[in-house]
Image (tube, coloured by chain):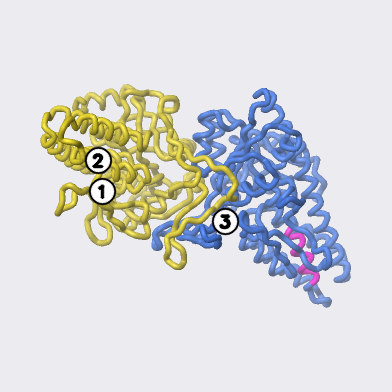
Chain colours: A blue, B yellow
């Protein structure tokens, strides 16, 4: 989408040297736009683990390019064990996002079919490129399907402002372009609909306040930042028409693992009769599991992410500040699971599906095998 | 309670000069313990408005002392209009906390009965002292009644850790001593119960992370700071046994206005079969209204409280940092309303009452008139 007056995406191969992958280092947003060069799979792992890049779809694309870089680094004689090890390490960087596992497995499979290292490198490069292109196309389709929901609300409200609440960043910064949850919003905005987005700041890492607010603002979409505590009050007072969030992993029956706090917004939406939608590419489904609460491993991150917060001082330095007593312990679960019963629909690149097993089996049948 | 190794309260008359009221300036916690002298009603207004002191019960006590200081400042000839004006200005400092209105009205009433200014000053001083003492006694009683709930859970869990989740600060820092929501916890802790508190950080002003965590830590009570987004996940996984929060205003049918985000925790508690209690002195009831959603005026505060956050830098300076794009708008509602249907009980100084009109009418009959 548009940022700093030009079209930007989150990840691409460097124009003058296709052995380097470039990404936006999102840790510096919203204050600085920093481009980072990644030239080894280890650098990709660090970028994923330390959240230079984040968002389930983007992690998948980055992991695909990571396997391409691993192939470039692999020894010519028996590269397989190097690639298998890199794959295992890559998969371990973030346990919740299913796209990461999926992309790495896709790369391993395609490389196994090539006997020469040069063949493996070429196949990994081409597939990474294809996964990136597919992500863009999928996000575009999610927008085209999802915009119908916003058009319907706009009609019902006779053109009055349509208020969408979103949590975390499921925007183009979480993908390559368009985003998942934001794609229907960008599409509606391009069509001239009167849309406005309530942006949950999304503690502890503030992806809403720092990323979603930035990308919406850069593209010119009206929005307002709110604390994570505010959504229930806004819904009680008719100030939210629809909730759209992303997903890190969705089960075969439609349970949704997404950024911690999503479940609370789903409860408030249900209590106030407001539709709650999840936008996701089909690569975010984990068809092997049903019960998200029991079967999804929820990542626990460092307490320091809760105890410290980073931002720009009045002197324009980026600094972290301690916001708790130094000795108080803190706990930091990264995700929660919203049960399917609270989800009104799943917006995918194949259309909008109900969040239950039968409906999703129908979707699964449409997917290419593998 | 205990802080820095001694017994502290939030507000008292200066020992060597009873025309000065001293308070803890809570803006500096948890990093520095700063005592502030207040010698005019205008200073009390600033302290309330800019949240040097906060919490419905404490605001009530401070307003009572504010009216005493106003009496000291009033002209000897016709002091009434000065006092009426001070009262109106004091009431306007925070619109949601009903204790503020209540304490100011009590002071006006008692001063009207005195003809001389000296008589008014003495009456206001004595009543402020009495309101302070009553707050301490009420909080103590809330603890003695509320501890029964924790003892019951402890028995059911055969002495295993009892996990209480609380939102914002309804601790002794919100009152004079003991607190409301924390009083049952301190009482349980003194009795040797195995208690642990999940402390919601409570954005945007972080009263949980900066005040509740500090006071629990200073008193030695086991606790863990969590982001406001985490409570639902903890409840889904059996890690919360009971929720106890405070209240800024409670209606005659038991709707509870409390810090923004309380409603989301009440929804999650209900969805997971976890009891949700509100602890409050009876001065926090507004008997004149029933429907909290329609009838309670929810304060909107400045956007800067959302866009900036303050804390201690690694160089030990207190600084604010910007955490959103500079141009993104932000909205900042201070409170939300939890409907009575989500409240399992109200813990008051007269005992635990159900949150419905009939039960609360019974409580009202026990209260002294006026």
Does the segment drawn in magenta span residue A194?
Answer: no
Q: The disc numbered 2 marks a residue on which chain?
A: B
Distance (Cα) linking label 3 and label 2:
50 Å
CB under 8 Å between callouts 2 and 1? yes
Q: Position of residue B282 (x, y in %)?
A: 27, 33
- Mark sitting on residue A299: 3
Crowding near pointer 2: few (<14 within 10 Å), some, many (20+)? Answer: many
Question: Which residues are the magenta region?
Answer: A62-72
Same chain check for tags 3 and 1:
no
Q: Is residue A250 visible?
A: no
Callout 3: SS? loop
Where is residue A90? Give x, y as percent.
69, 64
- B206 with respect to A363 (left or right): left
Task: Reply above or below: A12 against A336.
Answer: below
**Disc 3 versus disc 2: nearer the observer:** 2
Report whether mark 3 lies on the same chain as mark 2. no
Which residue appears at 31% of the width and 22% of the height? Answer: B358
Q: Which mark is residue B38?
A: 1
């Amino acid at each position: 989408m548009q940022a700093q007056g030009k079209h930007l995406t989150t990840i691409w191969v460097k124009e003058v040297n296709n052995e380097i992958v470039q990404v936006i280092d999102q840790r510096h947003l919203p204050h600085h736009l920093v481009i980072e060069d990644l030239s080894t799979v280890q650098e990709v792992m660090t970028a994923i683990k330390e959240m230079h890049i984040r968002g389930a779809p983007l992690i998948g694309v980055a992991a695909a390019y990571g396997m391409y870089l691993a192939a470039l680094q692999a020894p010519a004689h028996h590269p397989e064990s190097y690639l298998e090890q890199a794959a295992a390490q890559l998969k371990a960087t973030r346990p919740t996002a299913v796209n990461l596992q999926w992309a790495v497995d896709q790369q391993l499979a395609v490389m196994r079919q090539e006997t020469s290292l040069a063949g493996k490198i070429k196949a990994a490069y081409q597939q990474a490129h294809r996964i990136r292109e597919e992500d863009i196309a999928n996000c575009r389709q999610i927008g085209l399907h999802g915009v119908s929901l916003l058009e319907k609300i706009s009609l019902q409200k006779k053109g009055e402002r349509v208020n969408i609440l979103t949590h975390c960043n499921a925007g183009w910064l979480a993908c390559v372009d368009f985003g998942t949850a934001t794609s229907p919003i960008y599409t509606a905005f391009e069509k001239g609909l009167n849309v406005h987005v309530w942006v949950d700041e999304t503690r502890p890492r503030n992806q809403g306040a720092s990323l979603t607010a930035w990308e919406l603002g850069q593209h010119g979409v009206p929005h307002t930042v709110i604390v994570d505590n505010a959504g229930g009050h806004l819904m009680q007072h008719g100030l939210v028409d629809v909730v759209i969030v992303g997903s890190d992993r969705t089960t075969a029956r439609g349970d949704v693992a997404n950024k911690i706090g999503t479940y609370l917004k789903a409860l408030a939406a249900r209590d106030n009769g407001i539709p709650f939608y999840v936008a996701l590419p089909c690569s975010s489904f984990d068809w092997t599991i049903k019960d998200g609460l029991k079967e999804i491993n929820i990542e626990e991150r460092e307490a320091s992410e809760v105890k410290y917060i980073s931002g720009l001082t009045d002197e324009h330095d980026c600094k972290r500040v301690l916001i708790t007593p130094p000795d108080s312990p803190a706990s930091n679960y990264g995700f929660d699971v919203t049960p399917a019963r609270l989800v009104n629909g799943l917006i995918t690149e194949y259309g909008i599906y109900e969040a239950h097993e039968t409906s999703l089996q129908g979707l699964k049948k449409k997917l290419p095998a593998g």
